[in-house]
């Protein structure tokens, strides 16, 4: 029996663009590293992670100049086949815009030829290094350059291409926002999921219910039924759970569910579908057993 090839997410960009830093924040170091052999002379660092189910993350490649130059060799088909998403990182402080543009265009070209259906996202990274009042114009300038390269490359190959750009920095919430927006677009049937989640939140009379992607704890879908002041709560929750999970794994343990309760609220985090955790916030009087039972009965409707 033939096994369906795994879909990949490629994270690319020149050396020093910030890929490793990004990875360790978004995935909190749950990465198994190994080496991916590309013929006798070339070896690239390669790391897998299960992300949204089947996807393997191929952290990339652009680290070495030689590899950048070798994207265009016969090996490129191997890398660019079965790609679901390309996330390309631009360093906003780079002084070699022309070279960066050529590299991006080369990656895009290989992608269009091997995985024409793939989605393309560009992150304009290290935005914290740009003076605050210049950020919008710098970002917009780079975005129009990226759009232009994308259009030209697509025209050359007569394959339609569309790119979405986000600004990011590891020093503020923009990195989390950009990745959440990307993950949100990768979840299949997200509308159906939201509809079901709404029903679930109503049955539970919950204040808020979140579905969190298993590898990153990014919010995949959410229903909010009351006002909250803190707009950064998702990012905070994501970081706290990731750190907790990391502490558990250091002791060789794994958590299945977490219940936090005080007189105001009762928060319950539980494993849900194969790709998600669910987090439900209810009134402080709701019993943990009732929430656990509701989650258990809801699970089969989401699989
Ligand atoms: P290679 O491993 O060579 O491919 O580089 P990389 O793309 O993985 O870059 P890496 O994550 O190693 O980051 C390079 C440098 O940029 C490090 O010193 C980081 O601390 C810094 N850096 C990464 N992200 C940001 C950011 O958002 N803002 C600022 N100011 N620095 C950043």
Image (spheres, rainbow, N blue to C red):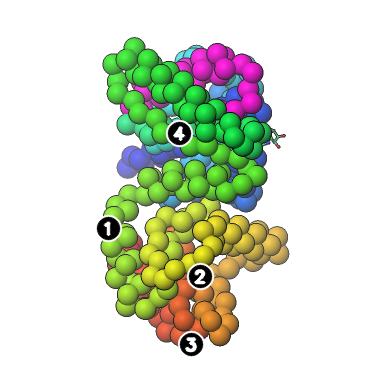
Task: Categorize mark 4 by other alpha carbons within 10 Å: few (<14), some (14-19), many (20+).
Answer: many
Q: Earlier in the sequence, mark 1 or mark 3?
A: 1
Res 60 visible: no
- Mark whose residue sits in front, 4 or 1: 4
Structural crowding at the residue carrying mark 2, measured as other residues with C-alpha within 10 Å and reported as few (<14), some (14–19) or many (≥20): many
Q: Position of residue 210 (x, y in %)?
A: 44, 64
Question: Is the residue under label 1 in contact with that under label 2 (CB below 8 Å)?
Answer: no
According to the image, label 2 marks what residue? 269
Give the label on residue 285, or none. 3
**Left or right side of 222 for 96:** right
Give how far across and how far down residue 90 sits, in percent: 56, 28
Question: In the image, what residue occupies the spot 34% across and 25% down?
Answer: 161
Where's the C terminus, which quadrant?
bottom left
- Above or below — where is 83 with respect to 226? above
Dot 2 beta carbon under 8 Å from ligand 1: no
Taking the view exactly as shown, the residue that stands out farthest to the right is 251
Secondary element at tag 4: strand
Res. 227 visible in picture: yes
Magenta region: 90-116
Residue 33 x %, y %: 62, 41
Residue nearest the viewer, comparing 208 with 154: 208
Q: CA distance from mark 3 to mark 4?
A: 44 Å
Q: Residue 77 is drawn in which quadrant? A: top left
Q: Quadrant of ligand 1?
A: top right
**Residue under numbered circle 4:** 165
On the image, the x and y values in percent for residue 23 come to 60, 42
Q: Residue furthest front?
A: 133
Mark 3 or 4, nearer chain start? 4
The residue that appears at 47% across and 17% down in the rendered structure is: 106
Element carrying mark 2: strand
Q: Which residue is mark 1?
A: 192
What is the spatial separation of the Cα atoms under label 2 and label 3, in whole angstroms?
Answer: 17 Å
């Amino acid at each position: 029996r033939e096994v369906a090839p795994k879909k990949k997410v490629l994270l690319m960009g020149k050396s020093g663009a910030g890929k490793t830093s990004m990875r360790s924040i978004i995935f909190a170091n749950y990465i198994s590293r190994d080496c991916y052999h590309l013929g006798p002379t070339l070896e690239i660092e390669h790391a897998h992670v299960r992300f949204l189910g089947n996807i393997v993350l191929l952290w990339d490649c652009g680290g070495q100049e030689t590899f950048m130059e070798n994207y265009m060799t016969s090996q490129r088909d191997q890398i660019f086949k079965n790609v679901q998403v390309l996330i390309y990182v631009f360093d906003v402080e780079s002084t070699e815009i022309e070279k960066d543009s050529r590299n991006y265009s080369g990656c895009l070209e290989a992608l269009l030829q091997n995985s024409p259906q793939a989605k393309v996202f560009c992150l304009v990274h290290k935005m914290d290094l740009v003076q605050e009042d210049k950020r919008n114009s710098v970002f917009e300038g780079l975005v129009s350059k990226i759009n232009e390269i994308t259009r030209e490359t697509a025209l050359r190959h007569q394959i339609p291409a569309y790119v979405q750009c986000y600004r990011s920095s590891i020093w503020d919430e923009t990195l989390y926002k950009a990745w959440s927006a990307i993950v949100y677009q990768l979840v299949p049937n997200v509308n159906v999921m939201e509809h079901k989640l709404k029903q679930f939140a109503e049955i539970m009379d919950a204040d808020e219910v979140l579905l969190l992607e298993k590898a990153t704890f990014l919010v995949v879908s959410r229903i909010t039924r009351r006002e909250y002041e803190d707009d950064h709560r998702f990012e905070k929750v994501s970081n706290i759970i990731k750190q907790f999970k990391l502490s558990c794994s250091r002791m060789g343990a794994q958590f299945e569910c977490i219940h936090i309760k005080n007189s105001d609220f009762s928060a319950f985090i539980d494993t849900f579908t194969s790709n998600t955790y669910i987090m439900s916030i209810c009134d402080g009087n709701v019993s943990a057993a009732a929430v656990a039972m509701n989650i258990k009965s809801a699970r089969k409707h989401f699989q």
